[in-house]
Image (cartoon, coloured by chain):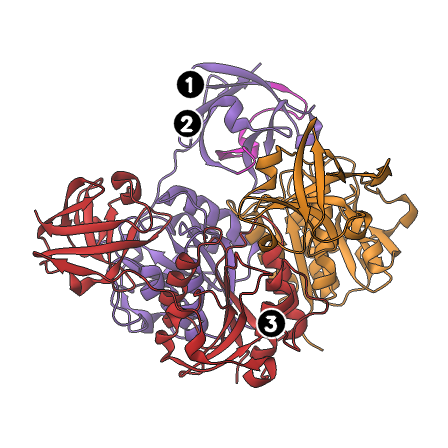
Chain colours: A red, B orange, C purple
């Protein structure tokens, strides 16, 4: 049996000590735990971006406790929860939809507890930093072997807040899919699986958004088109994506998260 | 006995390899040590911001060696020190005031050594990167169990450079307190404890700075006021703070570190 | 025998989950490995900056597996390699020159394998994220004790892509050297060793670039000149460098990477 793993995702940023302090709390509560930071630069309060990142990262990280804090409602009456999935992963975070995109990655929720008054929380619990006072210590104690039922009051999995992402659809041979994530390279991830675009590698397509249209080529990777050209590809999480080779599709197309894109015959 | 912990705070940033190299040196000198990064984005050379962060983070991290490097005078005649506190924490860094705000967190200084010519330093010591050549290896060796007296020459704790923060005061029923830390969310931490403001939860107050005044409400947390409204609250380190719910108090009020704010009857 | 170390450098940035996911893959493939992040903020696609950082960091980190990913040609026909050096360090990354500056740090290459179809790679291998699918798992398995020959097909070390940096030269008593790295403090690292400048400490020199000239003083460290003044010094990796005390030489001189600077008599 090796050391337990905790993954940690948040919108705390690294400019302040929020993340470091949560690491400190985890180290005090479960010194043997090893923490993998997924990212702490989720755009402030962007529950969807946090959820999309967690969903795609989970298959590549060790099973363990998966802590996520994007929590614009901290201190309000939103619940704090810990959730066990069928594959024995445990997710810890606010019950605002952030965790929900990952439920199916682990086979669905089998048990959930409300940790708002967890005996594992630090005392006193501040009104503004539940990452430090509730989520981190609960995650640490669960990583250390505590049972989920000890962490809080049981609650009905069916009542957990679920995030709904816009589904892709096809109209007259045109795929309509939404931008759900923009990465630091300017690549655009769409909420559609690669195979939902009916196009052969090498085929040209037209990409339309906000009333404008651009030609693009369906390829495997960036280097398959000349530098500066727009490409459509299946990204590394199996989702349809847009990029500009050594450039930024976000900047080229002026895309914002939530935009509906139309991909059709050139 | 678990692995020893080292916490690490600096203004090195993460864009270069300064932090990574210090981690490397620690791993060579004390492979079993575990390092918790508090933050490395202290504003360049801002000794006060570094000190404020360390002071508030220390109660939440494991006891161990606490390395801090914000060192605009590197290579000059400022001293490099390692300091033992009454609670057995050890602080390592430049003797420029950075460490001093944390002395009382650990019950005061019981022993101090000048590590400028430490036998634990790398050889040769560069003139510009004492984090790598002096502070990190000394911290690592102390974490590994070396006695403080082995790390350098004894020096008088009373002679350590102390940082003075402006004290809050009350004039005619108005609390005057200074902004000492601005976080990435735009929240403003004042150098005053929450209880120093004589106001009930829900009460309106007037906040004045730089000749302008804003209405605010005293509440527990962000979500206690509508989105976009200014609030006054006791933050998670017990200090008085200003925020805008889902916005930035720094931007709203145009505040800079060091500004004196007046909080009085609305 | 302690835990194996892996160092990790990339241009992935920390805004997304690329780095966290690679950490996750390493933890799955070799749970006992400890990962030291050198930096992940290498400018996008800047093979030279990545190579310069790795070359100077390597002497300060534990021997182990050294993973580096700056890979603008991902998915193209550039090779992916793992390389053993004479001092038993192992480097893993794309064969685009990134690793090559570090070869001599470890005494030269003694063995190289092409890991493009490594049995240690994840299946399937995506076309755009070889850090996750090839480089991280190969690095992890090598850290875990696998032999280099198991990681891929042998290839000729003489055929590895080598990066050439412009050599310094002296003309009429003037040293001509190139800027190869600009750090976050605005310090300029030149591709010349400190001793290549024929000047005494305290001596004034003229620094010329892009047709303009500035006076500077040769000193040991920043604080040896008044705040705001330009200095020439041997930096902490033994290389000639320019800085402004508590300011930015990059901004002052308008320097870009690759610029040739002339340092001569004042």
| Residue pointed to by mark 3 | A116
Q: In the rendered view, does C245 fall on the left or right side of C97?
A: right
Which residue occupies 26% across, 63% down? C126
Query: In the picture shown, does residue A88 fall above or below C226?
Result: below
Q: Which of label 3 and label 1 is nearer to you?
A: 3
Query: In this orientation, which residue lies closer to the viewer: B262 or C265?
Result: B262
- Residue stretch rendered in magenta on the structure: C184-204
Chain of the residue that carries numbered disc 2 in the rendered image: C
Which residue occupies 55% across, 57% down? C61
| Label 1 environment density (alpha carbons within 10 Å; few <14, some 14–19, many ≥20) | few
| Residue pointed to by mark 2 | C259
- Which image quadrant: the N terminus of chain C? bottom right
Chain of the residue that carries numbered disc 3 in the rendered image: A
User: Which quadrant would residue C25 be assigned to in this image?
Assistant: bottom left
> Can residue B124 be seen by looking at this rendering?
no
Q: In the rendered view, does A165 fall on the left or right side of A84?
A: left
Which residue occupies 66% across, 38% down? B215
User: Which quadrant would residue C180 be assigned to in this image?
Assistant: top left
| Residue pointed to by mark 1 | C210
Query: In the picture shown, does residue C131 fall above or below B48?
Result: below
């Amino acid at each position: 049996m090796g050391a337990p793993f905790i993954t940690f995702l948040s919108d705390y940023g690294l400019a302040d000590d929020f993340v470091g302090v949560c690491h400190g709390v985890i180290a005090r509560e479960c010194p043997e735990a090893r923490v993998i930071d997924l990212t702490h630069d989720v755009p402030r309060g962007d529950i969807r971006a946090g959820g999309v990142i967690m969903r795609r990262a989970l298959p590549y990280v060790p099973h363990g406790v998966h802590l996520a804090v994007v929590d614009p409602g901290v201190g309000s009456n939103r619940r704090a929860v810990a959730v066990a999935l069928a594959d024995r992963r445990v997710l810890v975070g606010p019950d605002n939809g952030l965790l929900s995109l990952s439920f199916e990655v682990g086979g669905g929720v089998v048990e959930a507890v409300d940790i708002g008054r967890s005996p594992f929380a630090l005392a006193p619990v501040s009104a503004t930093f539940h990452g430090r006072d509730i989520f981190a210590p609960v995650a640490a104690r669960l990583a250390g072997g505590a049972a989920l039922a000890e962490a809080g009051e049981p609650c009905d999995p069916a009542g957990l807040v679920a995030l709904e992402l816009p589904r892709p659809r096809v109209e007259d041979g045109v795929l309509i899919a939404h931008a759900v994530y923009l990465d630091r390279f300017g690549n655009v991830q769409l909420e559609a699986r690669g195979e939902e675009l009916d196009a052969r590698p090498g085929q040209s397509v037209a990409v339309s958004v906000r009333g404008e249209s651009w030609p693009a080529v369906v390829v495997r990777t960036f280097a398959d088109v000349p530098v500066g050209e727009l490409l459509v590809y299946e990204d590394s999480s199996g989702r349809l994506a847009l990029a500009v080779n050594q450039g930024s599709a976000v900047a080229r197309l002026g895309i914002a998260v939530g935009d509906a894109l139309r991909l059709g015959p050139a």
